[in-house]
Amino acid sequence: MKRVALKFCGGCDPEYDRIAYCEKLHITAGDRIEWARPDDNGCHAALLICGCPRACPENDLASTYPRCIISITDDEEDSEEVIKKLMTIAT
Amino acid sequence: MIKTKEDYIKSLKEMGGLVYYKGELIRDITTHPAFIPHINAAAKTYELALMPEHEDLLTVTSHLTGKKVNRFTHIHHSVDDLIRKVQMLRLLAHETGSCFQRCVGFDALNAVYMTTYDIDAKHGTKYHQRFIEYLKHIQSENFMLVGGMTDPKGDRSLAPSKQHDPDLFTHVVEKSDKGIVIRGAKAHQTGGANSHEIMAMPTQTMREGDEDYALVCAVPLNAKGVLQIFGRQTNDGRKIERSMDIGNPNYGLVGGETLIVFDNVFVPWERVFMCGETDFSGSLVERFATFHRQNYGGCKGGVSDVLVGASALAAEYQGTAKASHVRDKLAEMIHLTETIWSGSVACSARGTKTASGAFLPDMLLANCSKLNVTRNIYEIGRLAHDIAGGIIATMPSEADLKSPEVGKYVKKYIAGVAGVPTESRMKILRLIENMTGGTALVESMHGAGSPQAMKVMYSRLGKLDMKVKMAKKVAGIED
């Protein structure tokens, strides 16, 4: 099981339902991933769920998780593909 | 420390304070229907800070303590902070469809922070350090503040000290080694009834002779001598009915304003941040106004998003959604909304660092943003009325809908397209009525200053002399 930090942007004017997409990812991941808060220690990777392509918090998170962040900016990507990518980059 | 909505409501209950409404002292505003919607709206500033999907906007690291604090108690230290502020306001307006009130105190904190630094630099006073200690207290308690700028002003053609009644502008009436005593009032105080403290500031530039009116101080709203009188709003009787006729039953109609009276209120020196420095009253007013005018494309942009959605839904419920003129009106509403939003983002993006290290939005663009709001909100409302139809002015009440005698007729004749409950149609029409009538529009006109106040700023900041030079150069005119 990989431990993944989950962070959202603030959601000022999102272009899709971030929470619904996140729930879909949770279901898809099952017990492959243990989700943690962004400030929790010992995470293998980070998933950033943003409401639009600007992905405002990306830079903040990059310093904590260099090279192992996946940013979601729409709900079009297949959830299984996202989980596979997370499992691959998790170090 | 206040963290949750429940903490916030408990703090208001425990605080007490004197709040009057329609001639009566309200013993507990947290259980009174005239106040509950406004309390709910302000409580969103606490609730969203605890939600993972919103905390990135609602919380921030304090530059004073390094601790995580609510953004409404933060001092902006970058352009990014300024932008995130207006993003947060748009988000909160999406959640409430109304005014959540807490930005006024937020703006007061920021304006006073940078101005106390400047006063000390010139006069060798100790206001800034004093203010920092106060700010730490506000951040650690997570208190909600009122930004108390507007005095009653009496005869607008006369200076504060020349008024027939000296209390028409808030002023110092006594000084001692322990503190000062103030008297006067602040009008139109958004969120006053459900805030913890007021930051009283001068309402305008003060001149020689008006030193007692050049006053900035923080006063708890339950201090001895403070009382508040809650203003009436359009259709406020519907709040008492607690019916769907109010339109926005959970969050009400704009902020809920009070007249805050200071009847010989003692303020200890540690809560005084300007006392007689007339030379800084003007810059404080301009900075506060800049911060507050920066907001309006955020909060009113967010409110307009809700109104656009309500108008689209009303059209769908009555079968007009596909009409080309309706689609065009909705597109125009979106255009006007994004125009006011772009002003708020622009003045934030062009923000600059002050001597204190805190950031201030671009003054000219902030004023421009607010002036657009005074116009665009009326036009957005007009288009919403156009789409919704005259029924928002003539529709029967919820009581009629639920009446055993006439309810069946309301259901039958107020129905729109098949399959949509009449009640749903009535709810969305009532929301449009709530968001576009009376008090809602006036707040967009005069909140953060009336349109002429922005025009005055244009004459000072608009660089007209440079524009004349440009024209001469292009036209080939040589002096």
Image: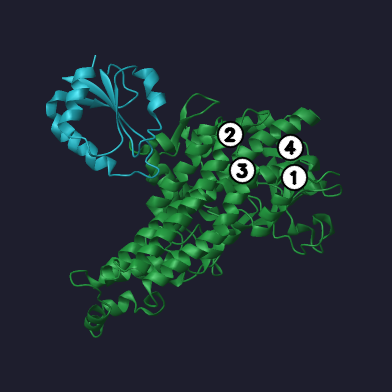
Query: Which residue is painted at 47% across and 26% down in the image?
Result: B67
Labels 2 and 4 within one chain: yes
- What is the x, y in percent for residue B113? 64, 35
Rounded to the nearest angstrom, the CA distance separating label 3 from label 4 is: 24 Å
- What is the x, y in percent for residue B213? 77, 49
Q: Quadrant of residue A51?
A: top left
Residue tagged 3: B108
Rounded to the nearest angstrom, the CA distance separating label 4 from label 1 is: 27 Å
Rounded to the nearest angstrom, the CA distance separating label 2 from label 3 is: 11 Å
Query: Which residue is painted at 18% across and 27% down in the image?
Result: A83
Picture colour for chain A: cyan
Mark 1 or mark 2, earlier in chain: 2
Residue type at numbered disc 3: Ala
Query: Which residue is painted at 24% across and 14% down in the image?
Result: A91
Labels 1 and 3 within one chain: yes
Tell me if mark 1 has few (under 14), some (14-19) or many (20+) residues whose alpha carbon lies within 10 angstroms of its own: some
Rounded to the nearest angstrom, the CA distance separating label 1 from label 3 is: 14 Å
Chain ID, mark 2:
B
Q: Is residue B230 left or right of residue B148?
A: left
Tell me the quadrant of the picture where the C terminus of chain B can be found.
Answer: top right
Q: Are marks 1 and 2 in contact (CB under 8 Å)?
A: no
Name the mark nearer the viewer: 1 or 2: 1
Q: Is residue B207 left or right of residue B193?
A: right
Q: Which label number is shown at residue B282?
A: 1
Tell me if mark 4 has few (under 14), some (14-19) or many (20+) residues whose alpha carbon lies within 10 angstroms of its own: few
Labels 3 and 4 within one chain: yes
The answer to which of B343 and B441 lies nearer the viewer is: B343
Secondary element under disc 1, as helix, strand or loop, is: helix
